[in-house]
Image (cartoon, grey):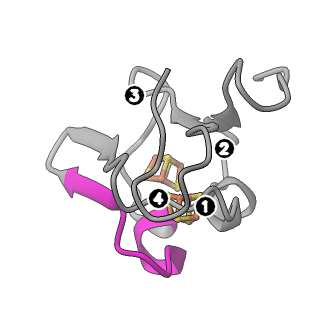
């Protein structure tokens, strides 16, 4: 189980990289700069994420989800 260093909470956010189209919308809304996007690679930096969920609502194709530590969400 991962915990965010900032809040000590369980990390609850997950990106499904094989479904991502790397548009960058999530990167722009993250207040912690916790999403790293490099060409065709994307990841959440666990130590910076605060589980605010802004990236979930920003993703136009809904490929950022709560993981098992949060609330499971169906993915299209
Ligand atoms: S949950 Fe919030 S802090 Fe974490 S990656 Fe998404 S926007 Fe950034
Ligand atoms: S907003 Fe969604 S599709 Fe766009 S880069 Fe982020 S995870 Fe990928």
Q: Which mark is residue 17?
A: 3
- Asked if residue 74 is positioned above or below residue 20 in the image, the reply reads above
Marks 3 and 2 in Cβ contact (< 8 Å): no
Nearest to N terminus: mark 2 or mark 4? 4
Q: Nearer the viewer, mark 2 or mark 4?
A: 4
Nearest to N terminus: mark 4 or mark 1? 4
**Start-end of magenta stretch:** 26-37
* Rendered-image quadrant of the C terminus: top right
Q: Is mark 2 within 8 Å of ligand 2?
A: yes
Q: Which mark is residue 61?
A: 2
Residues packed near mark 4 inside 10 Å, few (<14), some (14 to 19) or many (20 plus) = many
Nearest to N terminus: mark 1 or mark 3? 3
**Label 2 vs label 4: CA separation?**
21 Å
Judging from the image, what secondary structure is the residue with disc 2 in? loop
Marks 1 and 3 in Cβ contact (< 8 Å): no
Nearest to N terminus: mark 2 or mark 1? 1
x, y percentage for residue 22? 36, 49
Q: Is mark 4 within 8 Å of ligand 1?
A: yes
Q: Which mark is residue 55?
A: 1
Judging from the image, what secondary structure is the residue with disc 4 in? loop
37 horizontally vs 21: left or right: left
Q: Which mark is residue 25?
A: none
> Which residue carries the number 4 mark?
49
- Asked if residue 39 is positioned above or below residue 55 in the image, the reply reads above
């Amino acid at each position: 189980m991962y915990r965010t260093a900032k809040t000590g909470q369980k990390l609850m956010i997950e990106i499904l990289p094989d479904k991502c189209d790397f548009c960058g919308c999530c990167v722009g809304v993250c207040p912690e700069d916790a999403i790293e996007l490099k060409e065709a690679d994307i990841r959440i930096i666990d130590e910076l994420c605060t589980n605010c969920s802004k990236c979930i609502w920003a993703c136009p194709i809904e490929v950022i989800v709560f993981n098992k530590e949060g609330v499971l969400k169906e993915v299209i």
